[in-house]
């Protein structure tokens, strides 16, 4: 038996968990009609197959109609959920893992114009900034009804065969009762801490009465809101002890902070550039004080940190949730002593940010996560071995090389630079985003292990490609910044890439025109403002940087607001003219014939990229498919079979930004779904 602390079993009440690694509750927004159907089930089963001890579904499942999810959550208030959950539970159990579900009433953390348009309820009229709904202050019959809803939902989950449930408190209705900031009720549910806890204990009591003393019930909560006027650490310690002493809960799942604003959410669930495991010691304090089973997760992305959390006695179960989105086979690789093969979580938070903008959770650099029904995590070997030539070693090219090599093909990669990375290497020069380079480094290591032939410092021409005698050619040459967006003065502006690469020195009074809304614009503004320069970000959009999304925006805003950066929305840069040693920039509006002017010493334009596609079009006439892609086959997971040119000796494809400016995930997904069938 292994002596690895992470691989030791853990006894929780009557349930034996096979190791100390869990996936904490989270909602990847995969339900269909509010039910955990095929996509949702396949996602959890994949991780169970690979050895995780406990997978916690939902984040959170709604217990009541007046708790409408603001993104696609499981609806635990519907009886039909039982059958779907039972199928998921049975399949997870078949692979030796335990499965639980998190239940909640969102309270004010939702909107009144979702689902059935019922009033949002809370123990006060105070609005939550993130979701903007002004709630109805709860009445006695609301409390009675919702206590019953919790009990009903718990009973449904017990019928489905789950190993236990977890109630979500932080940010949701239960904690809204706890915090003086969100509870202005009178006794018995308002006032003293004991009164503010009464609703939670009434809910727990109703669940115990319905489901019995043996059913596992836990609570996920904040032990310190870290918010002026909110619940303090001292009160959190008292709450923790009272939960233990109540006899109504079996484990504590501890976090620290608040989630009613984007900055609060980002501090509680940190992203790249922020400290790893920032609340681990705090969770350890609660475990030491209570001596009670304690779970925790918050940016624990690597095995070493997780192992320390268990070995040091800070936790009983360690959550590695985003890490399992990056690599669902993480536990299997630990068991097999293949930790170097684990695909690292880079903290990009593409997964969570997509959810909060109404999309499905996808991992930035594992395109199979959330697509387990159609995309493989383990690449199958090809029956016929081929020669595959790839041009470009950015994320698209590196993923194509990795997948082709896993298939068993002979792979050659041409790259004009002296090392791989493409745009990722550029963005990773920012210290806050340096973790991004792991997307490339992991693929490079995987490719080298499979014998991929890399030819760096080679600006490949058609003759170089043909000399490899390829069966398949994949153009992944990416794109170059497009800055020619002005009526006049295009020669007077620089690109964000010029700034980020250091090829152009930042000015002292700079206008950044951001018409792409992605990281590059904010990164350039951040780098320029750090020099002490005056920076104004101008965008024609009604909000700036819409592609960056909420949680990733927070670190930028903290820097840029601290430096007094100006943000100007709904104005478009029209033209630039030289005026002495300065530049006069004219702004126009899409809303009418309005103009404004700025005098600056530098104009930086962020307008995406245009494909580097000359090589593709040169090779196209010589290819057997003439570059054509069968989209129906591609999207349905079938191999390409287009044949247009009998004289062609190879097939030709292009992927990533060599097709059109998109993002890293799109580039990697392009490569995976094409090359897995070559």
Image (spheres, rainbow, N blue to C red):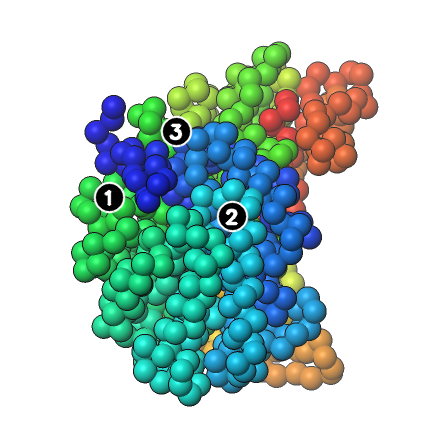
Name which of mark 3 and mark 1 comes first in the sequence. Answer: 1
**Residue visible at 53% across and 16% down in the picture:** 408
Name which of mark 2 and mark 3 comes first in the sequence. Answer: 2
**Residue visible at 69% across and 84% down in the picture:** 594
Q: Position of residue 161 (x, y in %)?
A: 52, 42
**Residue visible at 52% across and 62% down in the picture:** 150
Q: Which residue is mark 3?
A: 332
**Vertical position of residue 334 compared to residue 27: above or below:** above
Q: Which residue is mark 1?
A: 310
Of badges 2 and 3, nearer the viewer stands: 2
| SS at circle 3 | helix
Quadrant in which the N terminus appears:
top left
**In-front residue for pair 292/444:** 292
- Quarter of the image holding residue 168? bottom left
Q: Which residue is mark 2?
A: 158
Q: Position of residue 286 (x, y in %)?
A: 23, 60
| SS at circle 1 | helix
């Amino acid at each position: 038996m292994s002596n690895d602390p992470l691989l030791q079993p853990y006894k929780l009440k009557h349930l034996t968990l096979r190791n100390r690694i869990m996936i904490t509750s989270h909602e990847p927004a995969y339900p269909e009609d509010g039910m955990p159907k095929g996509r949702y089930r396949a996602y959890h089963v994949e991780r169970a197959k690979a050895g995780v001890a406990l997978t916690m579904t939902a984040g959170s499942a709604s217990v009541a109609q007046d708790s409408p999810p603001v993104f696609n959550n499981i609806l635990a208030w519907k009886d039909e959920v039982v059958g779907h959950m039972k199928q998921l539970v049975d399949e997870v159990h078949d692979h030796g893992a335990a499965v639980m579900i998190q239940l909640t009433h969102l309270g004010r953390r939702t909107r009144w114009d979702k689902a059935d348009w019922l009033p949002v309820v809370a123990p006060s009229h105070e609005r939550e900034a993130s979701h903007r709904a002004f709630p109805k202050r709860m009445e006695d019959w609301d409390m009675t009804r919702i206590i019953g809803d919790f009990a009903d939902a718990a009973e449904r989950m017990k019928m489905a065969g789950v190993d236990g449930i977890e109630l979500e408190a932080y940010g949701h209705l239960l904690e809204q009762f706890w915090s003086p900031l969100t509870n202005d009720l009178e006794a018995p549910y308002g006032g003293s801490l004991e009164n503010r806890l009464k609703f939670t204990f009434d809910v727990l009591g109703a669940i115990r009465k319905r489901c019995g003393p043996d059913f596992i019930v836990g609570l996920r909560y904040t032990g310190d809101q870290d918010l002026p006027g909110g619940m303090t650490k001292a009160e959190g310690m008292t709450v923790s002890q009272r939960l233990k002493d109540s006899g109504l809960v079996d484990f504590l799942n501890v976090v620290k902070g608040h989630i009613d604003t984007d900055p609060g959410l980002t501090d509680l669930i940190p992203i790249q550039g922020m400290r790893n495991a920032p609340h681990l010691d705090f969770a350890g304090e609660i475990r030491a004080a209570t001596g009670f089973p304690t779970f925790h997760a918050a940016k624990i992305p690597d095995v070493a940190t997780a192992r320390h959390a268990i070995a040091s006695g800070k936790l009983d179960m360690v959550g590695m949730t985003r890490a399992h989105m990056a690599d669902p086979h993480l536990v299997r690789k630990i068991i097999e002593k293949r930790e170097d093969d684990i695909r690292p979580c880079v903290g990009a938070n593409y997964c969570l940010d997509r959810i909060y903008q109404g999309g499905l959770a996808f991992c930035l650099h594992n395109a199979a996560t959330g697509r387990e029904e159609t995309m493989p995590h383990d690449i199958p070997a090809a029956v016929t071995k081929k020669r595959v030539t790839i041009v470009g070693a950015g994320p698209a090219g590196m993923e194509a090389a990795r997948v082709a090599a896993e298939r068993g093909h002979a792979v050659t990669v041409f790259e004009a630079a002296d090392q791989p990375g493409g745009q990722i290497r550029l963005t990773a020069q920012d210290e806050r985003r340096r973790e991004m380079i792991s997307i490339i480094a992991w693929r490079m290591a995987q490719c080298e292990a499979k014998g991929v032939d890399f030819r760096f410092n080679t600006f490949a021409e058609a003759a170089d490609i043909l000399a490899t005698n390829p069966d398949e050619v994949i153009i992944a040459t990416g794109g170059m910044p497009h800055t020619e967006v002005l009526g006049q003065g295009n020669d007077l502006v620089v690109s964000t890439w010029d700034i980020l690469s250091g090829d152009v020195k930042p000015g002292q009074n700079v206008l950044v025109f951001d018409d792409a809304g992605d990281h590059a614009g904010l990164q350039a503004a951040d780098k320029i403002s750090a020099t002490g320069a005056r920076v104004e970000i101008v965008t024609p959009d009604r909000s700036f940087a819409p592609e960056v999304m909420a949680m990733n925006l927070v670190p930028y805003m903290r820097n840029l607001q601290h430096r007094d950066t100006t943000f100007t929305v709904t104005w478009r840069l029209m033209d630039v003219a030289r005026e002495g040693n300065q530049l006069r920039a004219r702004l126009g509006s899409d809303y009418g014939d309005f103009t404004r002017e700025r005098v600056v010493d530098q104009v930086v334009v962020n307008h995406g990229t245009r494909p580097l596609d000359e090589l593709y079009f040169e090779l196209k006439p010589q290819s057997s498919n003439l570059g054509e892609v069968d989209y129906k086959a591609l999207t349905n997971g079938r191999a390409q079979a287009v044949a247009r040119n009998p004289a062609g000796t190879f097939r030709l494809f292009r992927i990533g930004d060599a097709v059109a400016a998109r993002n890293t995930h799109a580039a990697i997904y392009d490569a995976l779904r094409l090359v897995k069938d070559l």
